[in-house]
Image (spheres, rainbow, N blue to C red):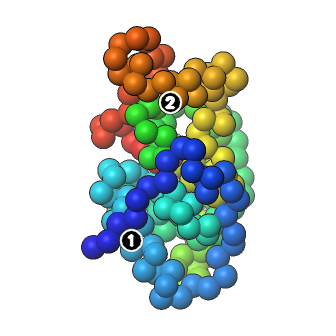
Amino acid sequence: MDTYPIRQFGDPVLKQRAREVTELDGALARLVDTMFETMYEAAGVGLAAPQVGMQKRLFTYDVGEGPQVMVNPVVAETAGEWSHEEGCLSVPGLSFEVVRAERVVVQGVDLDGNEVIVEDDDFLGRVFLHEIDHLDGILVLDRLDADQRKLALRELRDRELVDAGRFDSPFPPASRSRPRL
Ligand code: ZN
């Protein structure tokens, strides 16, 4: 099975707004299959099309209930907020405490064009918001406060200094045991 390379922080495709999907055809189904393979190979629990260089509004996910896809997702409702650790497959090596809405209702369609509405007040809702951010060209770094963002960018830039022990990182290292999106 094929996989795509996952686009990394600094790639301009991650900063662009993806376009609505208009054709639910075989090519789209093949793209989704390859995204599933790519997501599982990277031990990710969510993957948005722009992360594999495709400017389409869709993402794949699996929070332990099997592979799922959401096409043209829209956030229909949010309530409350909570902070939780998130790693991003496109921001290697780091994970961050990110504040997001707690209760989330997301509406989209599946590959057959059937309407899908999912409501969640736990980690799945967070996955949806993270992936929809990717579709809007927003990275997890953009959800940090200014100071944290500055530290994170310095760390991404000076990764080799951190690895060499030249300065301490305030961020927990990302690993396969932590969910990455
Ligand atoms: Zn991500």
Residue 56 left/right relative to 158? right
Give above or below for 127 relative to 166. below
Return the x and y of residue 161 as percentages of the image width and height.
42, 19
Q: Identify which amino acid the numbered label 1 is placed on.
A: Thr
Q: Quadrant of residue 17?
A: bottom right
Give above or below for 8 relative to 69. above
Q: How many marks?
A: 2
Return the x and y of residue 180 as percentages of the image width and height.
42, 44
Say whether disc 2 or disc 1 marks the residue closer to the N-terminus: 1
- Reading the image, the residue beneath label 2 is 156
Query: How many other residues sit within 10 Å of disc 1, few (<14), some (14-19) or many (≥20)?
Result: some
- Residue 105, can we see it? no
Return the x and y of residue 15 as percentages of the image width and height.
66, 51
Question: Looking at the image, which is closer to me, 167 or 66?
Answer: 167
Q: Quadrant of the N terminus?
A: bottom left
Q: Identify which amino acid the numbered label 2 is placed on.
A: Leu
- Reading the image, the residue beneath label 1 is 34
Residue at 32% over, 50% down: 43
